[in-house]
C-alpha cells in the first residue's frame, strides 16, 4: 500500500512571505507594517497574528485590486497609502517623495 505523508495543518508563516516580513518589521521600534496587496491577504495576516499573540496588531494595507493596479499603477497606490498613514498619525518628521 502506497501512503502519502501530508501534515494535517500547514504553518502559514512558512508559506507567506509577506506575513514573515510583517512579523520581522514589527520587531523594529516605531515601525508600522504596510502590506501592498489585496485586502484579503493583509486581513489574513492580521487575523493570524492577532489570534497568535492574543492582542490587536497594528498593520495597514494598500487594498489594491486588479483594476487599481492596471489603471493607477502600484507606485502611486503605495505613495497614497503612506501619505494617508502619515496624515492619520500626524507624523511631521516623515516626508514622501
Image (tube, rainbow, N blue to C red):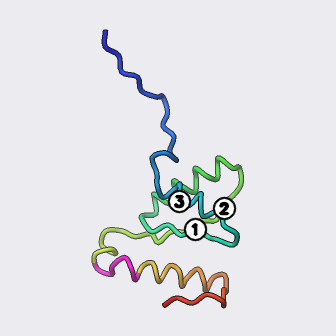
The reply to whether discs 3 and 1 touch (Cβ–Cβ < 8 Å) is yes
Q: Which residues are magenta?
A: 71-76
Instruction: Give the alpha-carbon distance from disc 1 to disc 2, as whole Å.
Output: 10 Å
All told, the count of numbered labels is: 3
Residue denoted by label 3: 21
Q: Marks 1 and 2: CB-CB under 8 Å? A: no
Q: Label 3, secondary structure: give it.
A: helix
1 or 2: tag closer to the N-terminus: 2
Q: Position of residue 71 (x, y in %)?
A: 28, 80
Q: Quarter of the image containing the N terminus? A: top left
Q: Chief secondary structure of the magenta span? A: helix
Instruction: Report which residue position mark 2 lands on.
Output: 27
Q: Between 90 and 75, which is closer to the camera in this rendering?
A: 75
The reply to whether the C-beta atoms of the residues labelled 2 and 3 are less than 8 Å apart is no
Side of 66 where 85 appears, left or right: right
Q: Going 64% across and 48% down the picture, which residue do you hit? A: 51
Counting residues from the start of the chain, the first of labels 3 and 1 encountered is: 3
Check if residue 57 falls in the magenta segment. no
Query: Which residue does the numbered mark 1 point to in the structure image?
Result: 33
The CA span between labels 3 and 1 is 9 Å
* Residue at figure coordinates x 36%, y 68% from the top left: 65
Q: Neighbour class for label 2 at 10 Å: few (<14), some, many (≥20)?
A: few
| Separation of residues labelled 2 and 3 (CA atoms) | 10 Å
Of tags 1 and 2, the one toward the viewer is 2
Image quadrant of residue 77? bottom left
Q: Position of residue 20 (x, y in %)?
A: 53, 54
Vertical placement of 74 versus 33: above or below? Answer: below
Amino acid at each position: 500500500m502506497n501512503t502519502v505523508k501530508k501534515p494535517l495543518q500547514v504553518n502559514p508563516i512558512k508559506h507567506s512571505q509577506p506575513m514573515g516580513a510583517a512579523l520581522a518589521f514589527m520587531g523594529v521600534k516605531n515601525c508600522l507594517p504596510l502590506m501592498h496587496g489585496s485586502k484579503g491577504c493583509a486581513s489574513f495576516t492580521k487575523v493570524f497574528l492577532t489570534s497568535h499573540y492574543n492582542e490587536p496588531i497594528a498593520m495597514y494595507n494598500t487594498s489594491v485590486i486588479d483594476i487599481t493596479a492596471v489603471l493607477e499603477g502600484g507606485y502611486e497606490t503605495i505613495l497614497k497609502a503612506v501619505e494617508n498613514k502619515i496624515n492619520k498619525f500626524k507624523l511631521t518628521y516623515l516626508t514622501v517623495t
